[in-house]
Image: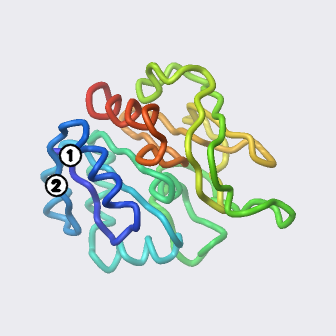
Amino acid sequence: MITILDYGAGNLRSVQNTLSELGAAHALTHEAVGLARATKIIFPGVGHFGQMMRALDRMRVRETLVERIRSGVPFLGICLGLQALFEDSEEAPEFPGLAMFPGRIRRFAADARVPHTGWNEIECKSDSKLLTDLGPHPYLYFNHSYYAPVVEATAATCDYTLKYTAVLDQENIYGVQFHPEKSGPLGLRLVRNFIEQC
């Protein structure tokens, strides 16, 4: 069963609708027991990094989430869900991330127009199952003010004042900074790839 981690993110319904359109059975959970039963986990996130991490701790799911990811359960983090995979964020440095990848989430420069909103091209760097049939330079929908550094697991980058991670792909861990649930047919293709290939 695909399990969506529900901490109250605003894009939850859109993710559910995408899975329903693909005919993918799924369930919501805000409890550790739900994560323990999951065969795949989707972590959609929007809003504030600190509020998200505080919600995970309040729900007492952080430890189970990390254990399930490390045990090999396929995981897809969307937008803030990707940022959660890093050590911490400038937005709320007092709240540690899940620390699956090294580095800090940083805000775009003061002279940049933020949030970075709209359709942007990504450059695919690696042969990622998640990006199958999306093409080398697909356009996808972004909406964020903070960005993740480029790391070894970066499968695609986006260039907005600087290059940053748009897609992560390492073993069972996947993350996208854009919103596939708002990215039309290509976003649908990506979610299908996660369901069928990852």
Residue at point 72%, 63% (across, down):
114
**Viewer-proximal residue among 38 and 12:** 12
Quadrant of the image occupied by residue 33: bottom left
Q: Give the residue at mark 2.
A: 27
How many marks can you see?
2
Q: Which mark is residue 173?
A: none
Residue at point 79%, 45% (across, down):
162
Mark 2 or mark 1, earlier in chain? 1
Residue at point 37%, 76% (across, down):
55
- 149 over 61 or under it: above or below: above
Query: Percent x, y for residue 152?
Result: 60, 35
What is the image's colouring? rainbow
Query: Percent x, y for residue 106?
Result: 69, 61
**Viewer-proximal residue among 130 and 92:** 130
Q: Amino acid at mark 2?
A: Ala
Quadrant of the image occupied by residue 60: bottom left
Say if mark 2 contacts mark 1, CB within 8 Å: yes
- 186 over 62 or under it: above or below: above
Q: Is residue 187 left or right of residue 158?
A: left
Q: Residues within 10 Å of mark 1 (few under 14, many from 20)?
A: many
Residue at point 45%, 38% (across, down):
184
Quarter in which the C terminus is drawn: top left
Q: Give the residue at mark 1.
A: 2
Query: Percent x, y for residue 108?
Result: 75, 60
Q: Is residue 45 left or right of residue 63?
A: right
Q: Secondary structure at mark 2?
A: strand
Q: Secondary structure at mark 1?
A: strand
Q: Amino acid at mark 1?
A: Ile
